Image (cartoon, helix red, strand yellow):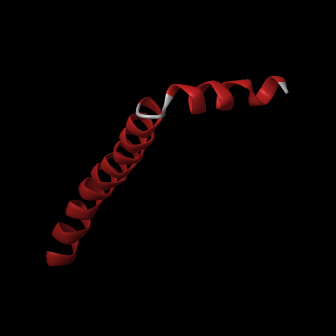
Amino acid sequence: MFHRVIHENWTTIVPIISFVFTAGIFLFVSIRAIRLPKDRRDKLARIPLD
């Protein structure tokens, strides 16, 4: 009986942990991209065209 309770808790916790992890990485990358200096942003934006 206890194995079932533990298993049910893990099936709820794992998606929450993976969502928080993914959201954290997305926020980190977004904030880092927003804080880039303008000249560096322009240089990176021109890379596909060069």
Quadrant in the picture for residue 27: top left
Residue sticking out furthest to the front = 39
In percent of width and height, residue 6 lies at 19, 70
In percent of width and height, residue 3 lies at 21, 76
The C terminus sits in image quarter = top right
Is residue 11 rendered to the left or right of residue 43? Answer: left
Q: Nearer the viewer, residue 2 or 29?
A: 29
Quadrant in the picture for residue 26: top left
Is residue 46 visible in the rendered structure shown here?
A: yes
Residue ID at (30%, 55%): 17
Is residue 1 visible in the rendered structure shown here?
A: no
Q: Is residue 42 above or below residue 6?
A: above
In percent of width and height, residue 12 lies at 25, 54
Q: Nearer the viewer, residue 17 or 29?
A: 29
Q: Is residue 42 above or below residue 10?
A: above
Q: Nearer the viewer, residue 21 or 36?
A: 36
How many marks the image carries: the answer is 0
Residue sticking out furthest to the right = 50
Q: Is residue 37 above or below residue 29?
A: above
Quadrant in the picture for residue 31: top left
The N terminus sits in image quarter = bottom left
